[in-house]
Image (cartoon, rainbow, N blue to C red):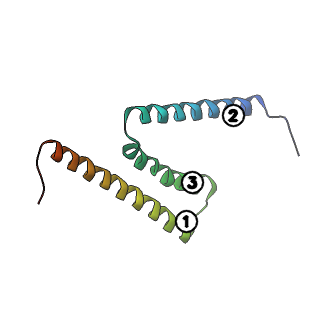
Amino acid sequence: NWRTPTAGEIGLAVLMGAFSTMGHWLIILAYRKAAASTIAPFSYVQLLFAGLLGFAIFGTVPGAMTLVGGVVIAASGLYTAHREHMRAREARLAAAGIRRP
């Protein structure tokens, strides 16, 4: 059943849209300033906060498979960040003419 939103509800929707737009704009600015491999691991924090907010607001508890999936995603992000760090280190050493045995 449809009902017309109140002025307060419309104001909250507009505020939600403004904050969402600002958040996306800040992400775009971050990707302009740094490599994607540097920024991507920070997006995994969204999984944690989504779960915490879901529990706090709606009382939902993630299932075992959701938790396993979150761990897999976080582990792959950490591995990628570590690998990129090692590649950058190797590139710096190669540029300096230093070889690792």
Residue of label 1 = 66
Tell me where residue 91 appears, x and y as whole percent.
Answer: 22, 46
Q: Are marks 2 and 1 in contact (CB under 8 Å)?
A: no
Query: Which mark is first along the chain, 2 or 3?
Result: 2
What number is the disc on residue 56? 3
- The three-letter amino acid code for the residue at tag 3 is Ala
Give the secondary structure at mark 1. helix
Q: Is residue 9 left or right of residue 56?
A: right
Compute the Cα span from label 1 to label 3.
17 Å
Q: Is residue 101 left or right of residue 12?
A: left
Position of residue 10 relative to residue 92, above or below, is above
Tell me where residue 40 appears, x and y as whole percent.
Answer: 43, 47
Question: Which quarter of the figure has residue 8?
Answer: top right
Viewport quadrant of the C terminus: bottom left
- The three-letter amino acid code for the residue at tag 2 is Ala
**Which label lies toward us, 2 or 1?**
1
**Which label lies toward us, 1 or 3?**
1
Q: Residues within 10 Å of mark 1 (few under 14, many from 20)?
A: few
What number is the disc on residue 13? 2
Q: Nearer the viewer, residue 18 or 40?
A: 40
- The three-letter amino acid code for the residue at tag 1 is Thr
Query: Which mark is first along the chain, 3 or 1?
Result: 3
What's the residue at 58%, 32% (across, down)? 21
Tell me where residue 43 appears, x and y as whole percent.
Answer: 46, 47
Q: Are marks 3 and 2 in contact (CB under 8 Å)?
A: no
Give the secondary structure at mark 2. helix
